[in-house]
Amino acid sequence: MIKQTHDPQSSQRQVLNEILAKNANTAFGKEHDFDLIQSYEDYRAAVPIYTYEEFRPYIEAQERTKECRLTIEQPVAYAQTSGTTGVPKNIPILESTIGVLSRHQQLTTFAQYQGLPTIFDGKILVLSSARAEGALETGTPYGSMSGFLHELLPDFIRDKAVLPPEVLRIEEYDRKYIAIAAHALAEPNLSLIATANPSTVIKLFDVIRENLAVLIELLPLKDKPVFHVNIPMPHPQPSRITELEKFLEQQAHLTLGSFWPGLRALVTWTGGSCAALLPRVQALLPPKTEVIEMGYLSSELAGSVNIDVRSNRCIPTFYDNFFEFVEEGNWEDDDAPVLTLAQVEEGKRYYVIVTTRNGLYRYCMNDIIEVTGWFNQTPTIQFVQKGKGVTNLTGEKLYEHHVTTAVEAIRQEYGIAFGFFLMLADPVRLEYTMCIEHPVLNEGVMHRLDSQLSMLNIEYKVKRESGRLQPLKVLYVKDGTSESYKRHCLAEGQREAQYKVVRLQYVKDCSFDFYSYAR
């Protein structure tokens, strides 16, 4: 794979040719003359950019009739995720997809071992959703991509995992976390934690801190039910129980490092809205614990692999998927140039379009990535935000990244870290409201935040100065609001493993009442 990074465009041509040749006799392939396509230019002319809703009829028809509508292979499962219409998206998982994902896990693990071999010295805590969460009417199972990836981890990692599969299948939120906390606490020699969203780490720590006495009582119970959930309990050594009991007198000063001083690494998302949580998470970790970027992952594909875990350089999975890009600022233009992997530029941001082996052709991910550099001749990328994390009340086109960057500037300038923040755009009042889980601050701090947004976005500055955009409002919400918001989102259909805070939203798109949590 490293050798291929010297000429990724050659691999891209091969991947595209393989996908088109294999699926030329599908209904979609015949409609778009796959057998006549001789080049990328032909492909771009024959196939427009698609959304999931345009693929949905093909996916549902293939599942219902078993006719080859999108792929020659029949799906053996589906990765299910929330859709823009409220109806879940079912992404086909083929037998060959499992092989692709398995290879991805092997590459990822090898890169981690090569860069930081000691992270595998102890036990491993992997937090994900369950692979099998249900079945369609046809009987084909569906689940989460994180669950599929979890089951495809190399055997030696699965052997080191502290959580039995039964724990990940617990549906009730609180009981699941109590069970996770119990198994994690029972193991003193934890060297690696892996979870997609860093908020999961914060949640786990909060559960441990708030329920430590109860958890210590539960641990010696072994196989007895935990809160009426029949799961196998860990069997900690008596010395571990004694060690944990000493922490009861130190609860105000506990961190994750208190329980696991040998923790070598946390593998998680570090980009997008997750970046705002990193200072809080890092404060909980032992000083020398590395934070490793998990990579660009979604229900549709494993989109990047972290090739250099010491500096968190991630390259697109160009050897498995075909990538196209549209520059962020050009996305709304009808004639926007569509670029290949070889045409992107360092420092620029792009919308991602993918063609995958599981039947997504020129599929708009509605994700924005940034090209951060180069690994040989292959660009390195980082996820920035979902495409929908952009608002426009008066022509300012404010992006989620502007908000997170402004908040980070406030943190650096004043030493203030917001555990949770979210900005709401009101097109009726022509104003933005920043919801912050924090005690009320000096008014000058929030004026500074408004100034930072003006510095980052010239149109925001112009609209504020002209009075077309009202002054930034701040709503300080009570401690625990972030958890209530997360529970609300999960109740609305989001999966915990896929939960991401969209830090910039229109008021109409946010069904959570932040005002009822005002301080």
Image (spheres, helix red, strand yellow):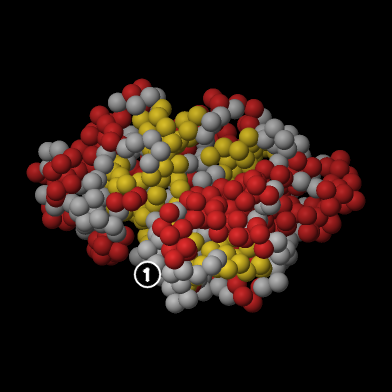
* Image spot of residue 448 (x, y percent): 60, 56
Task: Give the left or right position of residue 230, taking residue 40 as reference.
Answer: right
**Is the residue 123 above or below the residue 130 in the image?**
above
Residue bearing mark 1 = 85
In the image, farthest residue toward the front: 466
Q: Nearer the viewer, residue 184 or 386?
A: 386
| Residue at left offset 66%, top offset 73% | 517
Residue 340 shows in the view: yes
Task: Give the left or right position of residue 276, taking residue 395 as reference.
Answer: right
Residue 127 shows in the view: no
Specify the amino acid type for callout 1: Thr
* Image spot of residue 415 (x, y percent): 69, 48
Secondary element at tag 1: loop
| Residue at left offset 19%, top offset 43% | 20
Picture quarter with the C terminus: bottom right
Q: Nearer the viewer, residue 463 or 73?
A: 463
Picture quarter with the N terminus: top left
* Image spot of residue 355 (x, y percent): 28, 46
Q: Quadrant of residue 230?
A: bottom right
* Image spot of residue 41 (x, y percent): 15, 41
Q: Nearer the viewer, residue 475 or 517?
A: 475
Q: Nearer the viewer, residue 517 or 249?
A: 517
Question: Quick one: label 1, few (<14), some, or many (20+) residues within 10 Å?
Answer: few
**Is the residue 14 above or below the residue 409 in the image?**
above
